[in-house]
Amino acid sequence: MNRWTERGDGEFTRTLRDGRKAKVFEQALLIRAAVDEQMVDDLFFTTRHAMELIDMWEAGEEPLTFHPIDKHWLTDAIGRYTRKSGPITLIVSMALCGSWKFDREAWRCFDTAEAARRHADERFP
């Protein structure tokens, strides 16, 4: 488990042996995990359990099932992306500084619109 890193935002990440990126994060009071563009179907109560299970899966000791994360985003004339998630509308737009922002977590900056949309998709299915 010592290969996991956390940047101070509560999201733990690690690069797997095959180059894919694994991450563990909080979503609606539970812990979720993702590997690249797929969400792990399991829900976790602790980040430690999620990280241990990913480590065991990578070693071939534990099976995991996944589902794709991709959601359908709409874009408008000014390059802003929107998507409905239940009763709320998620918005990804470019900030004045040139970075991309996700309206539900305005303190985070993303290099690309794709990275911001992926982050939103993982947290708001």
Image: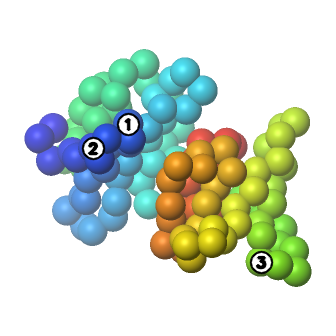
Q: Which callout, 2 or 3, points at the residue further toward the start of the chain?
A: 2
Q: Mark 2 and 3 residues: CB-CB less than 8 Å, in contact?
A: no
Asked if residue 69 shows in the view, the reply is no
Q: Mark 2 and 1 residues: CB-CB less than 8 Å, in contact?
A: yes
Q: CA distance from mark 2 to mark 3?
A: 31 Å
Q: CA distance from mark 2 to mark 1?
A: 6 Å
Q: Residue at x 63, y 72 (%)?
A: 96
**Badge 1 is on which residue?**
10
Q: Mark 3 and 1 residues: CB-CB less than 8 Å, in contact?
A: no
Q: Is residue 81 above or below residue 98?
A: above
User: Residue 79: which numbered mark, if any?
Assistant: 3
User: Left or right: 79 with respect to 2?
Assistant: right
User: Left or right: 56 with respect to 104?
Assistant: left
Asked if residue 99 shows in the view, the reply is yes
**Residue nearest the observer in this picture, 22 or 42:** 22
**Badge 2 is on which residue?**
6
Give coordinates of residue 112: x percent, y percent. Answer: 54, 74
| Residue at far left of view | 2
The C terminus, quarter of image: top right
Label 2's element? Answer: strand
Please tell me in which quadrant of the rendered image residue 100 appears: bottom right
* Amino acid type assigned to the residue bearing label 1 in the image: Gly
Give coordinates of residue 56: x percent, y percent. Answer: 23, 39
Label 1's element? Answer: loop
* Amino acid type assigned to the residue bearing label 2 in the image: Glu
Q: Residue at x 55, y 54 (%)?
A: 119
Q: CA distance from mark 3 to mark 1?
A: 29 Å
**Residue nearest the observer in this picture, 43 or 91:** 91
User: Left or right: 114 with respect to 32?
Assistant: right
Q: Residue at x 36, y 21 (%)?
A: 46
Q: Residue at x 15, y 47 (%)?
A: 3
